Image (tube, coloured by chain):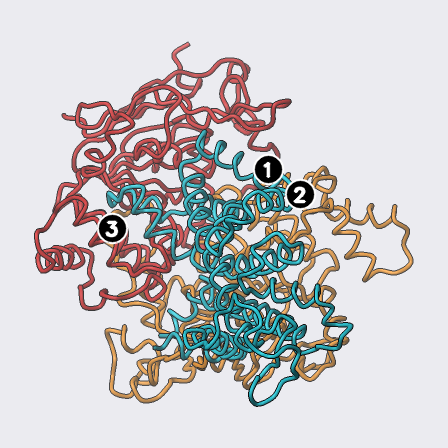
Chain colours: A cyan, B orange, C red
Amino acid sequence: MKVLKDLFRDYRFVLSFCVLCLLLFLAFLTVFSPYDPTLWGVVPRDLKPSWKYLLGTSSKGQDIFWQAAFAVRNSLIISVIAGVVSRVIAVTVGMVAGYKGGLTDRILMFLSDSFLVIPLFLIIVMLAMLVRQMMNLVTLGLLLAIFGWAWDARLIRSQILSLREREFTQTAVLSGTGTLRLVLKEYMPFATPLVFSTLINNMSWAIGMEITLAILGLVNMDIPTLGTMLQWAISYQAMFLGYWWWLLTPVVLAILLFVALYWLSVSVSEYLDPRTRLQRVGAQ
Amino acid sequence: MNGTILRAEQLQAFYVLDIFGTRRVIKAVDGVNLEIRENEVYGIAGESGCGKSTLLKALYGAMDPPLRLIGGKVYYRVEGKDVDIFSLRPDDVKKLRWEYISYVPQGSMSVLNPVIKVKEAYRDFLESHVRGKTRGEIFEIAKEHIAALGLPPTVLEAYPHQLSGGMRQRVTIALAALLKPRIMIADEPTTALDVVVQRGVIQLLKSIQESLGNTIILVTHDMGVQANVADRVGIMYAGKIVEEASVEEIFGNPLHPYTRYLINSLPRFGDKGTRESVPGSPPSLIDPPSGCSFHPRCPYTRPICREQTPGFFEPVAHHKVACWLMGER
Amino acid sequence: MEKLLEVENLTKVFTLGSLLSRIRIRAVDDVSFHIRPAEIFTLAGESGCGKTTIARIILGFEEPTSGAVIYGGKKGAKNERVWFTEGVQAIFQDPFGTFNPLRTVEQYFFETIQNYRLARTREEGVRLIDEKLRAVGLSYEEFAGKYPSEFSGGQLQRISIARALLTDPKLLVADEPVSMVDASLRMSVVNLFKKLREEMGVSVVYITHDLATAYYVGDRIAIMFRGNIVEMGPVEKVLIEPLHPYTRLLRESIPEADPSRRWGGRIALTETEYQEYLRTGCKFAGRCPEVMEVCRNRVPGYVEVDGVQVRCHKYNPL
């Protein structure tokens, strides 16, 4: 596990890794939740944090600790689905457009540019309003994925374009390697840091979007996520009533998540950057 | 014999790298002694990775991390006195640059600012070093300088990308000669250039040296260029100078086994007989061989070569060789 | 005398510029030559003369505007590159660019073996690789598991040759194989070409601007200038007694490793490349020390003088 050892030298990775492990643990704990997260009134309302109710209770009569655990889990699920699916689309589009060039490239880039130009937010709002009742974690994740690939596809395409001109592409062709295998084997090592860092950024973006949509009331408010928790707390005037434990929990968790994801992305992509990888290769 | 204008004593400059916890020390310049004279062209030759570019940087005083000065001194003879450049304050060193000593780095075709015309680059230079002239006078100085060196004056009105690589190289060299420095250092000025263009660059360097009567230190691995332009040549290997002599001696009577291989491997017209290159591969500067660094590739290795690094012997007047074989004579 | 490879009236035109100002550059202008088996054919000239473009066309990386490449009697078509490259392989200029810096070098070898079905088991493959490596002076042990950055330029270039030899090609296209290799290590690579020709009957298209090594290793040579072949013939004749003024200029400009033979005269470099490409008549007319009126107006045809083909009005029987 030399890789992990090398990564642990970076304080950013260490911190973000710890925070994410903690959050994942929290998400995992939901398996043991004594309450059904969608039910109201399962515990006394508006209690301050105590040993019995670690983070207090909300005006809906829910234990905030367990709500938070579910919120973290669900938000992560949404962002992972959004991130992964959009990566798959972005990488496919980027690589095909970059390597094939010509008409294929133009069509794909036209498609990608369209997705960039149309007012994303409004479309999401529109769609969200239409499918609101059917909205669950997966559909929300997919919805965000469809709007999250366009920018990165172009990024990957640029990378492929420059790699195509390098001489080792010609060596691979002369070795008889077919197009698909060439792109996967030769270019992926260069594209991986891009894919990874954009994955993390996309995940952050997805969480942010989810929170925004929730505040606007456009998601299924029964499912606890960081956004819906925040929205409920706001609509129940938690700030004015002084129920800081209810309001702060989703905010602090969201901030932790954003910072951790950012540091993770930065440290890992620095590690995966071909230039530093080359230095490491020489050092072995 | 001309006076000494630059002296290096036991110069040691290493790159100290710390990559992911592993410390690597690249001994690029490991104990170099040089005496460069006035009014001469001194060539430094050697394989890539032998430390020549680092040596130039050290002689110029450009020790940017991870390059560090580990030991030794470099003296310039300024106004009759020896000045240790590493003991100077950064401001004083800056004053010396471009007026006393100028540096044309490798790949200097890309050194010109791409968004300004060439004449602006010249103006920047002149303005920061010459006081009390109007813009018009400054442009005149630049034009005269360019014309005197045989370059077309239209070059000043162009942007760098409009000029060919060879022309850019010559413009950069002319810029380095603008303030009539006593020493000019050029790092591989002709690599990546076509043969005919290369000739133009070499001619430019020669004409600058002749008209200013200054010193040019030229680093190139191309022995043909060395033969055409250098007065004295120093052969560098694994961070040390292993042979130094006049250019006629180096080519006519190479004594160090490495130099012998180098000279004999050069193809010559009229002779299609087999030539051999130096066997083996260049040594690692991180973990150089013990004693004489050439011993793993040398056909004449003795036990002492493995154990002790040879100093300079002088079997022929003004012809220094760092080889134990010379000690036996 | 069979012809292994024949290039017939090859032309390649590049169009540069935008919609408003187009420049058409004839990078390769009606070039014809042939290569025999077991011969080292040198294509020499300065940068921008079209030699690399010809190499790319031969290898199938570029489509000619007109003209044909005939290999073993068959014209190469776009999709038939696989059979073509088994007999034709290439070496490139930058040894460190030839291999992906993030992959081990041996992976290319194994891929070649797999794609061309050169061995049935891994052991057989290793043996084949070792055989080819020994032919270039290396062994499998010192090569396995290493990345390109762990070799020197000269070694890597030899490894590149070994990879090219895996398919037992009849023709090797070497594009400036030693220009990025140190002067002291060049011979090791260049001597290999000689060995390949003598022991294995491989032909080499040696593309270079270094006339010294071209003289040392070549059998026949073609000098190119701005897309045209200006002189072609046996290396002894063309480089020792050049006929075309450009060849003479090149020959004189080579810095010889002999301090007693330094350059005498000086040269002037004034015209830009574009202007030279766009000339009507002989493209060298702008710089030619022996230029005549007819040179500026009419393109010279090929004349054969003592076994050497020259494209120059000086030798035109007019």
Residue B150 tag number: 2
Residue A202 at least partly seen = yes
**Could you tell me if the residues under marks 1 and 2 are in contact, i.e. CB atoms within 8 Å?**
yes
Q: CA distance from mark 1 to mark 2?
A: 8 Å
In this picture, is B14 found above or below B111? below
> Going by the image, does C214 lie left or right of A251?
left
Quadrant (top left, top right, bottom left, bottom right) of the C terminus of chain C = top left
Q: Quadrant of residue C22?
A: top right
Position in image of residue A8 (x %, y %): 46, 79
Chain letter, disc 1 residue: C
Crowd around label 1: few <14 · some 14–19 · many ≥20 (10 Å): few
Q: CA distance from mark 1 to mark 3?
A: 39 Å
Foreground of the two, A27 or C171:
A27
Quadrant (top left, top right, bottom left, bottom right) of the N terminus of chain C = top left
Report the residue marked by disc 1: C268
In this picture, is C3 found above or below C250? above
Q: Are marks 1 and 3 on the same chain?
A: yes
Position in image of residue A161 (x %, y %): 46, 43
Residue in view at x 53 percent, y 43 percent: B197
Residue C161 tag number: 3
> Going by the image, does B269 lie left or right of B5?
left
Q: Nearer the viewer, mark 2 or mark 3?
A: 3
Q: Secondary structure at mark 3?
A: helix
Chain letter, disc 2 residue: B
**Could you tell me if the residues under marks 1 and 3 are in contact, i.e. CB atoms within 8 Å?**
no
User: Label 3 is placed on what type of residue?
Assistant: Ile
Foreground of the two, C153 or C252:
C153
Q: CA distance from mark 2 to mark 3?
A: 43 Å
Q: Secondary structure at mark 1?
A: loop
